[in-house]
Image: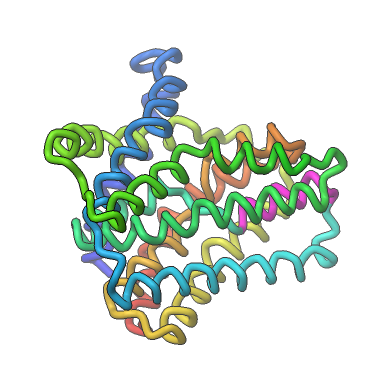
Amino acid sequence: MWTIITALWPVFALLLLGHLARRWDFPGEGFWAPAEKATYYVLFPALLVSRLATASFTGETSWQLALAVLLLLLAGGLICVLLRPLLRLSAPAYTSFFQGAMRFNTYVALAATAALYGDAGIVHAAIITAVMVPVLNLLCVLVFSATADERPGLGRVLQTLLANPLILACLTGIGLSLSGIGLPTMLGSVLELLARMALPLGLLAVGAGLSANALRGAGWSLGWAALVKLLLFPLLAVLVARWTGLDAQAAAVLLVFAAVPTATSAYILARQLGGDAALMAGIITLQTLLAMLTMPVMLSVLQWML
């Protein structure tokens, strides 16, 4: 476990630094929104394109990994649907619970993968992201469509999916790889420099977005979302990895993704599509704080089962 804690420590240290910097108003309140926007629209897409464009999708592992991601998401989604009668949440609150239980923080997942498994792990992580991002966005929007009082139309659903920079980056990177074009040297050197900024700035921005005030009065649904996301999902990942026959490293990276807290972008979707934004903020904050404890434990305990 100590090896995992040592590898993950820089990830959580940057989260804490971002939170403290925001509280101490450094470098100023006007910094964080543009920093998060630059990370989401430029730096992380640069990272995904640079890794996917040079990855190989012809091997059996890529298809096994894609299948494993789909099975993991379907199993998790089914559990969330079955829990709805038990939770007795309003429609907006349930959509926030669903996002909290299902979505994953790309920043934390990629940073943790890089810390634990280096560039080889990042290639697996990029493949997982390429499948997870569009499928999860589609599932979450469909849940909004099925449960929210104000249901978004098909055009709005498609607009949400097609405007997602991570989805566009994944499609671009995979297209460059499958076409045989790859990543031109002149473009690749620029993307590589941008990619190096993605993980540290992304983690600082996630930490800056944490708010203890969001935990007040949010109710017990926070605990249910954390239970599903931080404990049940890693267990499901192990079962799926074994059933699909993933190799050790691909399975380990899948486990990392399953163990991370929910995505901060879930708050934006909750506000856009009529979810419970206050509850969503509480879920994000609680899970990110708990993940500092649960991730090392779950990764240490479950890796021997892979």
Residue at image point 34% right, 70% down: 62
Q: Is residue 49 magenta?
A: no
The magenta stretch is: 90-101
Residue 147 visible to the viewer: yes
- Please name whichever residue, 159 or 262, is drawn nearer the observer in this view of the structure: 159
Q: Quadrant of residue 265?
A: top right
Q: Is residue 103 left or right of residue 90?
A: left
**How many numbered discs, if any?**
0
Q: Is residue 70 left or right of residue 247?
A: right
The quadrant of the image that shows the N terminus is: bottom left
Residue at image point 52% right, 40% down: 264
- Please name whichever residue, 5 or 75, is drawn nearer the observer in this view of the structure: 75
At which x and y percent is residue 28? 39, 13
Q: Quadrant of residue 246?
A: bottom left
At which x and y percent is residue 181? 22, 49
Majority SS type along the magenta span: helix
Q: Is residue 92 magenta?
A: yes
Decide: is 186 above or below 287. Answer: above
Q: Is residue 129 left or right of residue 118?
A: right
Decide: is 195 above or below 23. Answer: below
At which x and y percent is residue 73? 57, 66
Residue 278 visible to the viewer: no
Query: Which colour style is shown?
Result: rainbow
Residue at image point 35% right, 74% down: 251
At which x and y percent is residue 259? 45, 62
Residue at image point 84% right, 38% down: 150
Q: Quadrant of residue 306?
A: bottom left
